[in-house]
Amino acid sequence: MNIDISGKRVLVTASTEGIGKGVAEAFLREGCNVIISSRSEEKVRKALTELKKISPSVWGFTADLTDDKSLESLVSKSFEIMHGIDILIVNSGNPPREPSYFFENSMEDWEYSIKLYLISAIKLVNLVYEYMKNQRWGRIFFLSSWTVKEPQRIFSLADISRASLIQMAKLLSKELGEFNITVNVILMGSFETEGAKKSLRKFAEKIGEPIDVVWKREVLSQIPLGRTGRIKEDLGSLLIFLSSDYGSYITGTTILIDGGMTRSI
């Protein structure tokens, strides 16, 4: 099987560290042109310095997923640099409040979370779909979590706010299929990122237990394969396959990549 997506133009949001950065690196190694983004200018500069060692075909801009004007600017700059976007990968960080139980969240927490996960995805799709439609080719991915399928009490904000992305991907697959644009949700299991560790560390402090005990019990012991996911090798490879012609018949679905962690069918 010879997968070739070289030259494709990719926009990955929230991509200066963790999941997003690993995904951006995976596409760079395949010869793609990649735009990364973060709310922090310092993080953008640092990530670009590291990623440009892999390929010069990477650019970065500051962008706030909860701000419409910021997203408009990000997409506009991406078009200026790459003259188009073939692959949109909507990734996001965590709400500041999380991990939190339902009744610990204020209405401001809910509004922020919905903007972060759902409204941003709607906005970004609206900004790129006309171009993809006109060129009759495109790939749209919403990076989400296995906890949408098997909700966890401590991730109330994310699980509720992201659940609608599954409906949106199904609906968009029907709207955009005739233009050879696929839309899928990737439900990620546990990947050992700084963001994941930070969230679990906050939870460990909340319940008064050592982080290593909580990590082993809540994460590693729950994964049949006995390990966390590898961003570039596991997640990146999946996205690259789905972005190639071999993945052109897969759309409107949710794909679990969790080492068997999810117990629901």
Image (spheres, rainbow, N blue to C red):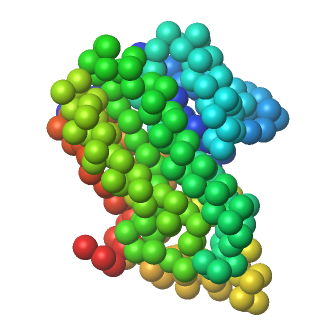
All told, the count of numbered labels is 0
Q: Is residue 78 left or right of residue 39?
A: left
Front position in the image: 151 or 242: 151
Query: Residue lying farthest right?
Result: 42
**In this rendering, does residue 192 appear at all?**
yes
| Above-or-below relation of 235 to 113 | above
| Above-or-below relation of 150 to 232 | below
Q: Is residue 246 left or right of residue 131?
A: left
| Above-or-below relation of 168 to 249 | below
The image position of residue 35, as x and y in percent, is 58, 26
Query: Residue lying farthest front?
Result: 107
Which residue appears at 55% of the width and 80% of the height? 153
The image position of residue 84, as x and y in percent, is 46, 15
Residue 22: image quadrant is: top right
Residue 24: image quadrant is: top right
The image position of residue 208, as x and y in percent, is 76, 89
Front position in the image: 164 or 31: 164
Quadrant where the N terminus is found in the figure: top left
The image position of residue 164, as x and y in percent, is 41, 56
Which residue appears at 38% of the width and 20% of the height? 130
Quadrant where the C terminus is found in the figure: bottom left
